[in-house]
Image: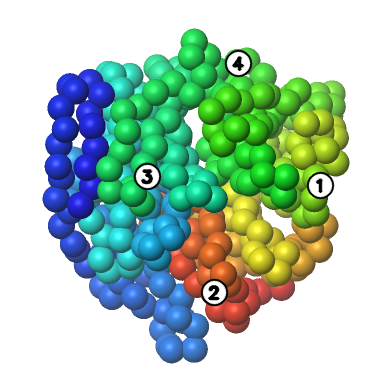
């Protein structure tokens, strides 16, 4: 059961979650807990968080996923008539594969488009749901709701930074907690050209301080720039980001001082069709990147893939396509997390559903190919 306060009506609604068995993604099979290879050697679980009959919105996009301390998962996304229309709100479900609560609209501040939810759980267990609100991306606002009980009930929404326009705090990917205890979130602005930066909180999300923009050689970079950083810390104070770009490749920047200052952004060998990316670092230091491996600006968002690095992102020798179809299909905007040796990915499935892929590192490596 999820309880939420609707800020536009001011009344408390208790919404009973109904449990449903989900259809498998991509392959067309009906078993929600199928394996990627159809045998018991690689128990990779994949499916959808809901069926089209369970929801009122015709389109959905930009999911986020969180592993709760209870062992369940939370997932959120935006849904409505179409990305950017005034009816779009933030939707949420919780549960486990084969046992998801019916999605509920957890945030609708006003009749403007809502965008890019981001779930984050603090070390103390408090859950944050960040999201954007606004008719246009360059002038959107960042709002936040919180939960003290694993997502069962939620606070009223509040602006992250009052009177901000352009979007502070996490723009699409999850914040991370650094070794010094500070929180750091990948942020970006899209006013004309695209610029990325980070927001840092040293008081558990109460206040945030932005870094300078990542410097770019705009004489060499094609298109608008870079946005939507995904972050990891490789050693105390050494923080890194990968960035979506308009230049046909993922960009990277590095910090030696807990994210306060950053190197100039530089192009990596990883392709990027100007589509969202996300990364998680496993406990052994292995990096798992979720992305679309196409090099054209606004290129194909099929397939969606996981790439693996053992050397802090210098090389990516293994890759697995976790969903694919025709060039015009869209499997995009992944969110990837890890807990123990398990990796969980949520992603947009042709704007009609939100799909997930869950497997261990060993199971990923069994089916991954040399890259």
Q: CA distance from mark 4 to mark 2?
A: 40 Å
Element type at mark 2: strand
Disc on the earlier residue, 1 or 4: 4
Q: Residue at x 45, y 65 (%)?
A: 357
Element type at mark 3: loop
Q: CA distance from mark 1 to mark 4?
A: 29 Å
Q: Residue at x 39, y 23 (%)?
A: 158
Q: Residue at x 82, y 57 (%)?
A: 314
Residue picked out by circle 1: 238
Residue picked out by circle 4: 191
Residue picked out by circle 3: 148
Q: Residue at x 36, y 77 (%)?
A: 34
Above or below — where is 363 with respect to 268? below
Above or below — where is 82 with respect to 232? above
Q: Nearer the viewer, mark 3 or mark 4?
A: 3
Tag 4 near tag 2, CB within 8 Å? no
């Amino acid at each position: 059961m999820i309880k939420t306060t609707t800020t536009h009506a001011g009344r408390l609604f208790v919404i009973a979650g109904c449990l449903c068995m989900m259809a498998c993604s991509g392959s067309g099979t009906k078993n929600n807990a199928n394996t990627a290879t159809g045998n018991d050697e690689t128990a990779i679980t994949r499916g959808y968080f809901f069926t089209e009959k369970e929801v009122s919105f015709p389109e959905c996009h930009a999911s986020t996923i969180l592993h709760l301390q209870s062992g369940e998962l939370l997932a959120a996304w935006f849904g409505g008539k179409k990305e950017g229309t005034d009816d779009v709100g933030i939707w949420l479900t919780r549960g486990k594969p084969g046992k998801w609560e019916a999605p509920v609209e957890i945030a609708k501040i006003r009749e403007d488009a809502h965008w890019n939810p981001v779930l984050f759980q603090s070390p103390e267990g408090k859950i944050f749901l960040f999201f954007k609100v606004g008719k246009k991306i360059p002038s959107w606002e960042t709002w936040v709701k919180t939960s003290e009980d694993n997502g069962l009930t939620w606070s009223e929404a509040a602006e992250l930074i009052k009177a901000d326009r352009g979007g502070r705090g996490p723009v699409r990917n999850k914040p991370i907690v650094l070794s010094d205890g500070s929180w750091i979130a990948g942020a970006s602005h899209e006013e004309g050209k695209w610029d990325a930066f980070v927001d840092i909180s040293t008081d558990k999300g109460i206040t945030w301080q932005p870094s300078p923009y990542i410097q770019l050689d705009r004489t060499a970079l094609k298109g608008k720039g870079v946005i939507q950083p995904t972050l990891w810390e490789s050693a105390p104070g050494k923080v890194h980001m990968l960035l979506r770009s308009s230049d046909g490749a993922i960009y990277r920047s590095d910090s030696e001082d807990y994210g306060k200052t950053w190197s100039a952004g530089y192009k990596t060998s990883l392709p990027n069709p100007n589509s969202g990316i996300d990364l998680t670092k496993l406990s052994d230091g292995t990096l798992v990147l979720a992305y679309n491996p196409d090099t054209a600006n606004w290129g194909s968002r099929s397939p969606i893939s996981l790439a693996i690095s053992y050397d802090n992102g210098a090389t990516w020798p293994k890759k697995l396509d976790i969903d694919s179809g025709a060039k015009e299909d869209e499997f995009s905007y992944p969110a990837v997390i890890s807990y123990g040796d398990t990796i969980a990915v949520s992603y947009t499935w042709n704007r009609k559903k939100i799909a997930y892929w869950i497997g261990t590192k060993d199971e990923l490596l069994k089916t991954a190919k040399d890259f």
